[in-house]
Amino acid sequence: MAGTILSSGVRSNLLTLQQTTAQQTVIQNRLATGKRVNSAIDNPVNYFTSLTLNDRSSQLTGLLDGISNGIQTIQAASKGIDSATTMVQTLQSVIKQAQSDAAQNRPTKSGTGLASAAEATLTSKSLKDLALDKSIVDIATGVPADNGVATTATATRSGDLGLTAGANGTRLAISLKTGTAPNDKTYTAAFNGANATLRDVVNEINKSGIATAFVDEKGQLNVKGVGSEELQFGFGKSDPASTSAVDIAAADALAITNAGAAGTNSNTALGFLAADATAGTGIKGQNLTSSIRSNLIQQFNDLREQIDKLAKDTGFNGINLLQGDRLSIIFNEKTGANQTKLDVQGSILSSATLGINQATNTQLDGFINFQNDLDLEKAGDTLKNALTSLRSLASTFGSNLSVAQTRQDFTKEMVNVLKTGADNLVLADPNEEGASLLALNTRQQLSQTALSLANQADQGVLRLFG
């Protein structure tokens, strides 16, 4: 009622009780929300600072999803590289299997014979020994000596027939060549003097690394290439008009460079054809098609195709780093020049980019001829290079993955720091607030008691009028 008049004692106690109730309400609100700053009215500096820190924390938390997706994208590409590496290693095994079946793919030829049966009857030596003991000069010139019977070997003239070099200084040489430029291999050797024998020729061929040779029991020279490439074999002589050292050296060079073509072709003296020294008509394999190698072709091509399919299936969330896609991982909430991010440029991974050609059974440009040793050797080198490329790409992605994972951990820690800092500015201490509320409750009870006493005092005055 507007006209009601309260005594000063009652009014004072009532005001104290109202203040205590208001403070109780504030503390109860703090305990209910857990915050001592719930609005800008409570503490504008702390309120807005906390709001800013929480806002940045929320933005970084949102970026964590993008970072996680980026990490998974890189890991998907890395797994793809691991599987591609396994397939390339399997391709290497196929190549090794093909190379192990090489014996029947060697170009081989046997001469028509060096010694006659009549000569064999004049000596206790076999045709094989007689052929090996024939001197090169004797074979090349066709001049018999001692009716074809080899003289007794001595310390200085083992196996020699006793012939001497021609008046013009006859020079003889062998030339072996296999393959085509720039991968051709050539071996040459010259023989000086009449006391060199066919045994020396056999030994020289076996030293070449290009072919092997032996004389069989029939006295026939056999030459066999160590690879599947066509083998050119030339045995020739050159008879310079001068016996000077310069002219003889020139004759050596002529015979060595193209034995069997330059100078006099003496292949026939060893039971071979003159054409055996010519490219395209040289000694070729007797069976250049290996069924085992043929069967491995499809296996090789299937594995090669799987590399391409594998690379296409390594995408994550629409991004495939093995198909040349680009990945950007954003690490902070800023824009423009202040934004930090990691750009990962993918690469197109395929059998073609690794340099792995298809396998075939014939010699074609851009294909691997499984019947050719040189092609298999090149394919083996290509697969080694492919593994090196895959390891390099894996290393690049691994480095990017490490950066992304480190930034992910940093962002999580940063979010925690921001949230903790924001909470420190606005959160209430429940122990402190609980103690304050208990004190206010006690004060409230005392205030109510004081107000009651004040009212009783006023009532005592009224009793005087009774």
Image (cartoon, rainbow, N blue to C red):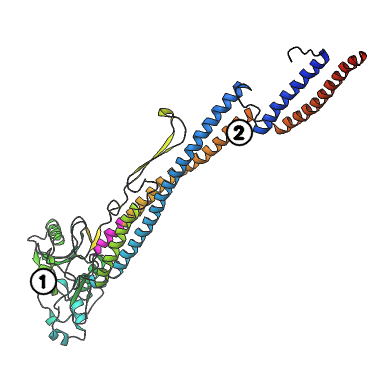
Q: Kindly state the secondary structure of the residue where label 2 is placed.
A: helix
Q: Kindly state the secondary structure of the residue where label 1 is placed.
A: loop
Q: Is residue 211 above or below residue 128?
A: above
- Quadrant housing the N terminus: top right
**Highlighted range, magenta:** 369-382
Q: Is residue 450 left or right of residue 138?
A: right
Q: How far from the left and from the top, in percent, is residue 56?
A: 52, 31
Q: Is residue 436 left or right of residue 123?
A: right
Q: Residue furthest left?
A: 241
Q: Residue furthest bottom?
A: 121
For the question of whether residue 370 can be seen, the reply is: yes
Q: Is residue 256 left or right of residue 60?
A: left
Q: Is residue 308 above or below residue 45?
A: below
Residue 377 lies in the magenta-colored region: yes
Q: Nearer the viewer, residue 229 or 272?
A: 229
Q: Residues within 10 Å of mark 1 (few under 14, many from 20)?
A: many
Q: Amino acid at mark 2?
A: Thr
The span from disc 2 to disc 1 (Cα, nearest Å) is 95 Å
The dominant secondary structure in magenta is: helix
Q: Nearer the viewer, residue 150 or 130?
A: 130
Q: Is residue 107 above or below residue 127?
A: above
Q: Which residue was labeled with disc 2?
A: 420
* Residue drawn at x 38%, y 53% as measured from the top left: 80
Q: Quadrant of residue 89?
A: bottom left
- Quadrant housing the C terminus: top right
The earlier-in-sequence mark between 2 and 1 is 1
Q: Amino acid at mark 1?
A: Leu
* Residue drawn at x 28%, y 56% as measured from the top left: 356
Q: Quadrant of residue 22?
A: top right
